[in-house]
Amino acid sequence: MEYVNDNFRKAEIQMRLTEFEIPPMQDVLIIGRRSPVGPESARRMVDVLSPEQYEIIRVEHALIEALVIRKSIMNMIQQDKLVALIIEEGEKIINEKMIIKIQLNITLEVRKSLEL
Amino acid sequence: MIRTTADFMIAPYETIEALVGLQRIKEVYFEKDQECFPIMENGGIIGILTRQDMMKAHPNRIAIDAMNGKFAYVKPDTPLWSAQEILKKNNLAALLVGDPKAVSGIVTPDSIKRELAKHTDLLTGLYKTDYLYYQAMQFITSGQKVAVIFADIDNFGGINKKYGHIKGDIILKEVSALLLANISQGTSLCRFGGDEFVLIMPCSQAAAIGFTKAFEQIVCDYTFCDNIPITMSAGVVANETWDQDFSCSQILSYLINKASLASTLAKKVKAVGRTDKIEIG
């Protein structure tokens, strides 16, 4: 009997191209106590990619080791109030092995009236 | 006489650069069997990575993100007992022997435990004499009075022969426990050897004699193993001023020797008819 080899191998390649986000994080990172990347690693990473733009704030929390926050945000909102808000929301979803990135959109609304 | 950090520090020791990953550090840990590592950055030590840190942290982390240990610098002539106090009081992971420019070795809680074990009597759990020399040095250098009590069990050899050495060991443990339970804070106690105990107190001779008499009553009231009758003899000496030409070690050696002779004299007095539970020489 003649042997016919009808097996074949093929590869399909799909490409998805998007622009690399610099830095590859948004406004805030919440770093869990046992997360794979610690606060110093995160700080060094963002300092190399975006020098002087982020600040590390270490916190006393059972699950959260530190926050990495874009400095410009703290020009708009007091640091302690911002940290309290981030922790309040972050602790609801984080566990100690996670790193959470947060996008913060802050809109300041100012209304003033002048006496004519 | 007094063991210092230079005598038992870990040297040479391995250091780890701040950016090295935990996976690699664990390999070094198993290879070198060093319980903690100084973490280096820019040529200086910035922290201590302990065994616990290695276990707790995610294996992907770098040294600087896993280390939690605090440290302090100590001089090479820091006594063992001071090193222990510094570590405990400040909850440190390690002591670095030297200064930031030159660290000659590290002292860890485990290395201190190992060293302390050599100075602890296995039967009674009391310290051996090295501890007394350290305490005497503390008292003398801080200008305090020092009284030495040398106490031993009368006819302990006879007790061993009559009741057996196991019973003798139990008696030694009971006497140690009685002494420990009754010494005041600041008093140091050690098993000098055999059935002999030495106490160092920061007080006058009169106060030391007062303690010895009070302890006499305690021994008298206590029921020892198998109701074995126990009496003790003690010698008490004290010096309130020190000749600056003598070292602390020389002063303590002199006092212990004098107290032991006084104790022997007390035994002789007892042998000629005195029946006190503790005879004070």
Image (cartoon, coloured by chain):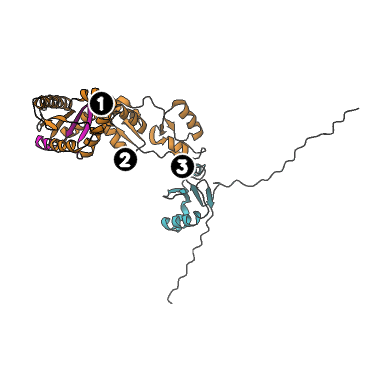
Chain colours: A cyan, B orange
Which residue is pictured at 84% across the width and 34% down the height?
Answer: A6
Q: Secondary structure at mark 3?
A: helix
Which residue is pictured at 31% across the width and 34% down the height?
Answer: B73
Q: Which residue is mark 2?
A: B90
Q: CA distance from mark 1 to mark 3?
A: 67 Å
The quadrant of the rendering that contains the C terminus of chain B is top left
Q: In the image, which residues are magenta?
A: B183-210
Residue B189 colored in magenta in the image = yes
Q: Which residue is mark 1?
A: B163
Q: Are marks 3 and 2 on the same chain?
A: no
Chain for disc number 2? B
Circle count = 3
* B204 lies left or right of A32: left
In the image, residue B9 lies at what x, y percent? 33, 27
Q: Which residue is mark 3?
A: A40
Q: Amino acid at mark 1?
A: Tyr
